[in-house]
Image (tube, grey):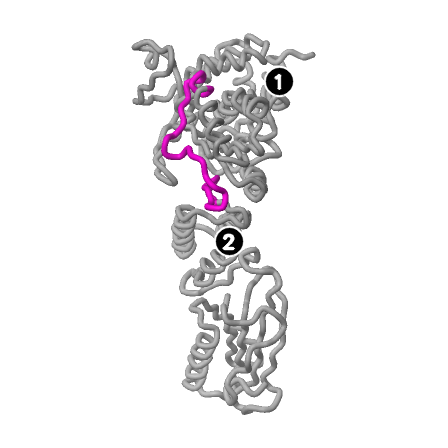
Amino acid sequence: MIPLWPKLTAAQNLFNAAHRAAAGKHARSDVAAFLANLEPELFRLRRELMGAIYRPGRYRTFPIADPKPRLISAAPFRDRVVHHALTNIVEPLFERRFVPYSFACRKGFGAHKALTLARDACAKYPCVLKLDIRKYFQSIDHLLLKDRLARVIDCPDTLHLIDLILASSIQSDDRVEYFPGDGLFTPIERPRGLPLGNQTSQFFANVYLDPMDQMIVRNLRPGAYARYVGDFLLFANSKEQLHDMHGQIREFLYRYRLSLHPGKSRVYWCRDGFPFLGFRLFPTHARLVRPNVVRFRRRLRQLQADYHASLIDKETVNQSVLAWIGHAMHGDTWRLREQIFDALALSRRGVQIARPWPRALPKTRTCFMFDAGCPASGPRPGNGKARSRQFLDGTLAAGCYTRSISPGQPEPQIVVLFVQLIVVAIRRARVPSIVVESTAPPHVTTAFRLLVYHPKNFPRGGNAPSAPPTGFFGSS
């Protein structure tokens, strides 16, 4: 068996760690500078690690207020490469020891799988105990964490590197909290806290709570169990069972110098719903909690403003919106998504554009296109056709109104007809979101196509709506 330290400091491991740390951050100046001199930087980092002269740099801290006030600490990029190199080697040793009900920051798990388990359990059991550890990352005790790591890692050099990372990441916290057996100065003398945002912090957080996971699964044995970082659920058939589990878990966490949030730890009836990972879960459905919807609406308005100012392109908007849609689809949010995107239109320099977000609307709805003849020919039977089209290229046009203007048509009349076209389309669709495209072929002076998006009143099926007014679009 190859010792851990040679594997950790191997050139290939450092190379892989650099690319994992840079994923999605290539546009940042510090990342670009490191990657521009990748080989010299990695060999210098490797020499420092092997010569035991590596020292972590200073963290860059900044506050965030959404969804709640937090202090984020960002390590220098070369230190983040070391963090990834460490977890690449050490994490597999612990992964096989973790219970399969811890879903945070693990390959093949994640928040959506935790939601799936919670929804299934909510439909099966009548009661749930929801627990939340108060300020979990800021409360992790370094001495207890090192003891947990040393039980599995039998490599002094690797443990020394972990000591350096922990020593450089002590988080200041004004809270003074006493636990059974503490002396007067114990809370001050014991170092604690992990920075939010580190790759190692996520891994250490899973290691620190693994004894609690083992105790719950082996001793308490609830009907179902799911944990995501410091939020966890226990399901059972009676409230009395859950209240008893609540007391045992609280006493167990005291050994690890952790406490439960008094306002967020309680027993619920599943039929009344309970919050978990941004959703409110019920036995039959799940809803997004209101703060999440408010934050997305705010972000969407910012995306609209940035796109209008040409600060971002359409692809950036699509990626952000589709990511939220993919998350929201894990609940019963079709009506909510329809409401949000009905009145949305992106514009740049006064021209509105279509938005290819097909997952925001049902895939079975049919859209209709009305094609009218030119005004000079007058209304003729069959001139206005109604034909259905399925969605093309993800563009969700619910109505497409086309009007061609003959070469001899006077310009004032063209303007009047064009305005009438817009008014009729808006009245029929009853939505403010429209797109105007100029489609002028060589043999026509002017031609307009008016696309009306997301009408609520159009039917969901193959039956076309009633024909446009006779005399303007022609009879159908």
Amino acid type at circle 2 is: Thr
- Give the residue displayed 54% in from the left and 46% down from the top: 283
Mark 2 neighbour density, 10 Å: few (under 14) some (14–19) many (20 or more): some
Looking at the picture, how far across and down is residue 24, in whole percent?
Answer: 52, 38
Viewer-closest of 414 and 356: 356
Q: Which residue is nearer to you in this view: 114 or 282? A: 282
Give the CA separation, mark 1 to mark 2.
48 Å
Does the magenta portion include 272? yes
Q: Earlier in the sequence, mark 1 or mark 2?
A: 1
| Residue 41 can be seen in this image | no
Decide which of 335, 382 is in the foreground and name it.
335
What type is the residue that disc 1 sits on? Ala
SS type, badge 2: loop
Residue 408 position in % (x across, y down): 50, 88
In percent of the image, x 48 and y 35: which residue is there? 239
- Residue placed under numbered mark 2 in the picture: 333
Per the rendering, the mark at residue 402 is: none
Where, by quadrant of the figure, is residue 177 drawn? top left
> Where is the C terminus found, in terms of image quarters?
bottom right
Task: Identify the residue under disc 1.
Answer: 10
> Residue 84 in the image: x percent, y percent?
54, 25
- Give the number of the mark in front: 1 or 2: 2
Above or below 199: residue 6 = above
Q: Report the side of 85 relative to 250 (left or right).
A: right
Q: Is residue 415 magenta?
A: no
> In the figure, 186 relative to 128: above or below?
above
Helix, strand or loop status at disc 1 = loop
User: How many C-alpha atoms fall within 10 Å of the one at disc 1: few (<14), some, or many (≥20)?
Assistant: few
| In-image side of 94 versus 238 (left or right) | right
For image coordinates 48% across by 40% down, the residue present is: 276
Highlighted magenta segment, given as a residue range: 252-280
